[in-house]
Image (cartoon, rainbow, N blue to C red):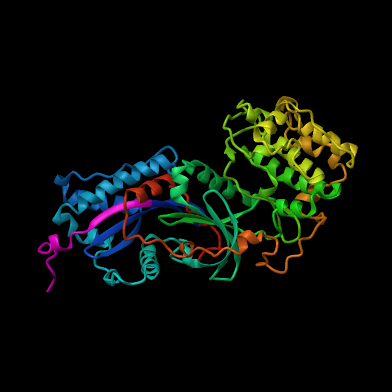
Amino acid sequence: MQRDHTMDYKESCPSVSIPSSDEHREKKKRFTVYKVLVSVGRSEWFVFRRYAEFDKLYNTLKKQFPAMALKIPAKRIFGDNFDPDFIKQRRAGLNEFIQNLVRHPELYNHPDVRAFLQMDSPKHQSDPSEDEDERSSQKLHSTSQNINLGPSGNPHAKPTDFDFLKVIGKGSFGKVLLAKRKLDGKFYAVKVLQKKIVLNRKEQKHIMAERNVLLKNVKHPFLVGLHYSFQTTEKLYFVLDFVNGGELFFHLQRERSFPEHRARFYAAEIASALGYLHSIKIVYRDLKPENILLDSVGHVVLTDFGLCKEGIAISDTTTTFCGTPEYLAPEVIRKQPYDNTVDWWCLGAVLYEMLYGLPPFYCRDVAEMYDNILHKPLSLRPGVSLTAWSILEELLEKDRQNRLGAKEDFLEIQSHPFFESLSWADLVQKKIPPPFNPNVAGPDDIRNFDTAFTEETVPYSVCVSSDYSVVNASVLEADDAFVGFSYAPPSEDLFL
């Protein structure tokens, strides 16, 4: 006999909400998936639905229940469907729609609503003590088939896809870890950030900017590439190229300075990366030896894009005070408008440090160092060529309008006599052998990382998927702040 769901409505009435949404890709098409949290008694699960599925359910119900005056956010004809504010507003409207569904027994018990919420799936009758990671995996697997997320049915990356092996770096918001993907044994650097710290310091815009810049980096050989980004309720994860030749800072500490030919090679690869960023209207703003890595054979890889500024064309300026004291340009210290020539100042400072062992105006007293940057003439000691002197003087010009790169940006750097012996075409194709080989033993070699990091214990919290049993206001706030963070590439290199 068919069960009368109306009789036990109060007993099994679900609680529903939409705590977050994610952007996905399938066959190069982008779409937003809304994560619906359904709770009934001691059981809870997620259902992943696209807007079109909400719209289909709405059209079915409004015909059968015209008196209910149901509504959902209208389709958007013009504008950006992936704008965070638009997604947030649409999510709120869809949340209100499903809240209305469970207020009325005749709606809640409709077969299409029960199917939409997956109320009658036996997989949801789980023991509350069951392992959360296993439950999450099952839920994602069962729901993803309903939204056609590609051949795997589950493009969501999660912490349990990886073995986290070593801590290889630390920052203001979290750690960088060497991780091996369980699927195929590939090694990655996974940057793990604490959402709470990011939100407390109001840095979410910088994190999202870093994610956006990383997505564009795959087109340049001297910029670190993003493979995936994903999030749990508490953390953000960047899955990046593992670059294990060591930081330029690490090698400078060991060797104090570099021969001119080696410094020239690094400066050229750095300039090429900066030139590419400028060509897509991005100012890097935080060039320093700690953010410059060497790959396994000695090529430069620029990393850490948290301070990048997007949307800055050659003639545009910005005013944000940011960067690292030793490498700040005079106009930044003066809090004057600045443009992409701040990156050429930083290139000059890094080149100076590679040749002489210290930044050009270095002083332990930061206030005195700022005064040196603003007013002290550049001191160039013997031991380098005249063309090296020349490019340092032109890059470290205190007036940004007269600085090398002010008029034609990277083209001026390329044409400077200091780089005359280089073929830029060969450089960008990595045809020029690096002057130094880090001699790494394999893809998981960490000898070029500081033991202060690598001897740390890997935190257990980064290795497990979040516990979604409690969805509170702070979690919802975090989800709102990082809408669109998660990313999986439209290629065969998926988490299958």
User: Where residue 200 appears, x then y in whole percent?
Assistant: 44, 44
User: Who's the residue at 67% across and 49% down the image?
Assistant: 290
Q: For residue 360, which quarter of the picture?
A: top right
Magenta residues, as a range? Answer: 1-20
User: Where residue 413 appears, x then y in whole percent?
Assistant: 78, 37
Q: Residue lying at the far bottom in this picture: please name it.
A: 1
User: Where residue 201 appears, x then y in whole percent?
Assistant: 47, 42
Q: Nearer the viewer, residue 343 or 116?
A: 343
User: Who's the residue at 61% across and 28% down the image?
Assistant: 317
User: Where residue 41 appears, x then y in whole percent?
Assistant: 21, 64
**Is residue 263 found left or right of 239 in the rendered image?**
right
Q: Residue lying at the far front in this picture: please name it.
A: 365
Q: Is residue 140 visible?
A: yes
Reply above or below: 282 against 402.
Answer: below
Q: Nearer the viewer, residue 287 or 90?
A: 287
Is residue 68 covered in magenta? no
Q: Nearer the viewer, residue 426 or 27?
A: 426
Q: Residue lying at the far left in this picture: please name it.
A: 7
Image label count: 0
**The N terminus is located in which quarter?**
bottom left
**Is residue 463 found left or right of 271 in the rendered image?**
left
Q: Is residue 220 visible?
A: no
User: Who's the residue at 16% across and 46% down the image?
Assistant: 68
Q: For residue 87, which quarter of the picture?
A: top left
**Is residue 116 found left or right of 107 in the rendered image?**
right
